[in-house]
């Protein structure tokens, strides 16, 4: 399927791609070759193939939530570079 110059420019516009004249011709040839390769698949009978979104079956691999003991506040703050009372102290990132 040979694409016209206008079709190539329209595709480039939709893709937000700026093209020089030589690039447009080269891209037109490449897109035409790609479409010709897909035309080979047109005669394949896919009437018995159900529509799918995935080619393989996917399963959820999330683990169950389990309650586990956490660190105490003293243990958490033990390695803090700076702390103030029971909080981490960090430099201000916003001007006041």
Image: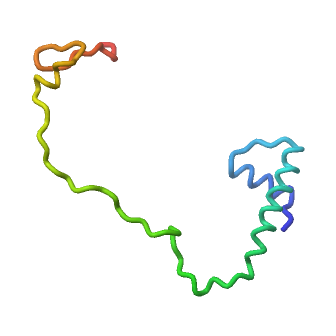
User: Where is residue 23 shown, x and y percent of the image?
Assistant: 85, 45
Which residue is at a point 73% across and 75% down the rendered structure image?
41
Quadrant position of the C terminus in the picture: top left
> For this view, does 7 lie left or right of residue 14?
right
Q: Quadrant of residue 80?
A: top left
User: Where is residue 18 shown, x and y percent of the image?
Assistant: 76, 42
* 11, above or below 93, in the image: below
User: Where is residue 63 shown, x and y percent of the image?
Assistant: 26, 55
Q: Quadrant of residue 46?
A: bottom right
The number of discs equals: 0
* 91, above or below 26, in the image: above
User: Where is residue 91 shown, x and y percent of the image?
Assistant: 29, 13
* 61, above or below 48, in the image: above
Quadrant position of the N terminus in the picture: bottom right
> For this view, does 39 lie left or right of residue 15?
right
* 94, above or below 36, in the image: above
Which residue is at a point 53% across and 77% down the rendered structure image?
51
Which residue is at a point 82% across and 55% down the rendered structure image?
30
Q: Nearer the viewer, residue 79 or 50?
A: 79
Q: Quadrant of residue 84?
A: top left
């Amino acid at each position: 399927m040979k694409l016209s110059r206008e079709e190539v420019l329209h595709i480039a516009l939709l893709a937000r791609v700026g093209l020089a004249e030589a690039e447009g011709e080269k891209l037109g040839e490449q897109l035409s070759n790609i479409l010709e390769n897909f035309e080979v698949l047109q005669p394949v009978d896919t009437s018995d193939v159900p529509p799918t979104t995935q080619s393989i079956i996917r399963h959820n691999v999330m683990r169950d939530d389990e309650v586990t003991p956490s660190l105490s506040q003293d243990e958490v703050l033990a390695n803090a570079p700076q702390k103030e009372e029971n909080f981490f102290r960090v430099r201000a990132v916003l001007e006041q």
